[in-house]
Amino acid sequence: MKKLVLVAVLVMLVLVIVAPTASAAPPTAPPAAGGYWYHVNYGDTLAGISWYTGVPMQMIIDANGITNPNWIYAGQYLWIPAYAPVYPPPPPPLLCSAYHTVQYGETLYSISLMYGRNMWSIAQANNIYNLNWIYAGQVLCIP
């Protein structure tokens, strides 16, 4: 019985001594290439860390094996994987077959009849959201 108590006390002592030193330094890097360690400060949240680093929160969760995203603590190190956002390709260049300077009294509908184009396509080509709001002197791209 005394041996069992002694072993239990030794195990507890080892855990108390080793546990704080193990969390003081960042662990070794995960196998995925690219990234860095982030030291969690008091008041940090995963959403805030995600915004600060520019890496999606789900990538941070996956890289660190976090099961409860609400439970991170100050002093903890989180692996922030390398992330390059993918932006959509730019729209194709606007090809204008003609340019029309709006005269007093003209409407988008009357201009569309002149050029045989749909007034919605003319509005879209010129970033017009209100079809009734064109003005004299405005130069329109006719697609």
Image (spheres, rainbow, N blue to C red):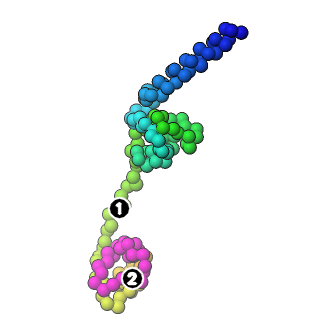
For the point 51% across and 20% down, the residue is: 17
Q: Quadrant of residue 68?
A: top right
Residue of label 1: 92
Q: Is residue 124 above or below residue 115?
A: above
Left or right, 64 with respect to 106, comes to right
For the point 48% across and 45% down, the residue is: 43
Can residue 72 be seen at all in this image of the molecule?
A: yes
Crowd band around label 1 with a 10 angstrom C-alpha radius: few (<14), some (14–19), many (20+)? few
The amino acid on which the numbered mark 1 sits, given as a three-letter code, is: Pro
Residue of label 2: 133
Mark 1 and mark 2 residues within 8 Å of each other at the beta carbon: no
Left or right, 53 with respect to 20, comes to left
Q: Position of residue 92 (x, y in %)?
A: 35, 61
Q: Position of residue 32 (x, y in %)?
A: 44, 32
Q: Which residues are magenta?
A: 121-143
Left or right, 58 with respect to 9, comes to left
* Closest to the observer, 39 or 27: 39
Q: Position of residue 11 (x, y in %)?
A: 59, 16
In the rendered image, residue 128 lying in the magenta stretch gets the answer yes
| Circle nearer the viewer, 1 or 2 | 2
The amino acid on which the numbered mark 2 sits, given as a three-letter code, is: Trp
Label 1 secondary element = loop
For the point 45% across and 39% down, the residue is: 40
Q: Quadrant of the N terminus?
A: top right
